[in-house]
């Protein structure tokens, strides 16, 4: 009986570890070439080609990984309000204050689903100096 119980507990532990691995995976959403330096949270990223992936429960976490630049980051998001006017192509939207760009939202395309990025301390400071940001849209390609 003791041998059976030990085997059962080992099996359950491995199953639990395997299940957590499934939730930790990320799924590529799009590839995008961003021609300017930008910020996500407190991280400055250079111009370059990036892959945007989702992970976490309900895609609440998005990761940005540089293809031709060696940078990456994971950031928390929230669902964006449906915006039927964005068209059917995936895209990233940036707020621009002066010469600074901040990632504001990621739009997946035809299903009108978007993820909004939380404003960083730096973006809130830039907002205080400029009432209305310009919006810069960068087209992406679904993976």
Image: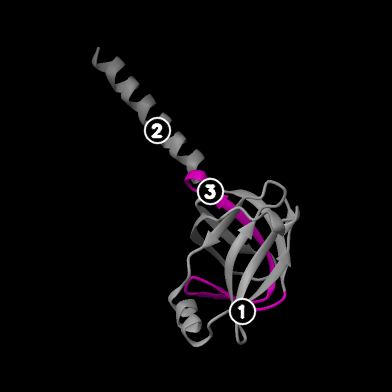
Quadrant assignment for the N terminus: top left
Q: Nearer the viewer, residue 18 or 29?
A: 29
Does residue 7 appear to the left or right of 67 in the view shown? left
Q: Is residue 45 magenta?
A: yes
Q: Are marks 2 and 3 in contact (CB under 8 Å)?
A: no
Separation of residues labelled 3 and 1 (CA atoms)? 25 Å
Report the residue marked by disc 1. 96
Picture disc at residue 16: 2
Does residue 67 appear to the left or right of 56 in the view shown? right
- Of pointers 2 and 3, the one earlier in the residue sequence: 2
Residue at 71 percent of width and 52 percent of height? 109
- Of pointers 1 and 2, the one earlier in the residue sequence: 2
Q: Nearer the viewer, residue 102 or 36?
A: 102
Q: In this picture, which residue range is highlighted in magenta?
A: 35-58
How many callouts does the rendering have?
A: 3
Location of residue 43 with respect to 58 vertically, above or below: below
Location of residue 110 with respect to 132 vertically, above or below: above
- Residue sitting at the far left: 2
- Of pointers 3 and 1, the one earlier in the residue sequence: 3
User: Regarding mark 3 in the picture, which secondary structure is present there?
Assistant: helix
- Crowd band around label 2 with a 10 angstrom C-alpha radius: few (<14), some (14–19), many (20+): few
Picture disc at residue 59: 3
Residue at 50 percent of width and 81 percent of height? 127
Separation of residues labelled 1 and 2 (CA atoms)? 44 Å
**Residue 99 in picture, x, y percent from top left:** 62, 86
Separation of residues labelled 2 and 3 (CA atoms)? 21 Å
Q: Is residue 104 magenta?
A: no
């Amino acid at each position: 009986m003791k041998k059976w119980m030990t085997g059962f507990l080992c099996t359950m532990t491995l199953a639990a570890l395997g299940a957590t691995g499934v939730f930790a995976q990320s799924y590529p959403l799009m590839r995008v070439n961003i021609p300017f330096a930008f910020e996500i949270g407190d991280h400055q990223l250079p111009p370059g080609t990036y892959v945007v992936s989702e992970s976490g429960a309900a895609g609440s976490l998005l990761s940005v990984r540089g293809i031709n630049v060696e940078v990456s980051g994971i950031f928390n998001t929230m669902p964006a309000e449906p915006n039927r006017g964005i068209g059917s192509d995936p895209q990233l939207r940036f707020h621009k204050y002066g010469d600074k760009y901040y990632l504001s939202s990621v739009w997946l395309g035809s299903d009108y689903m978007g993820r909004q990025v939380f404003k960083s301390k730096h973006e809130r400071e830039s907002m205080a100096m400029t009432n209305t940001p310009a919006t810069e849209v960068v087209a992406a390609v679904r993976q």
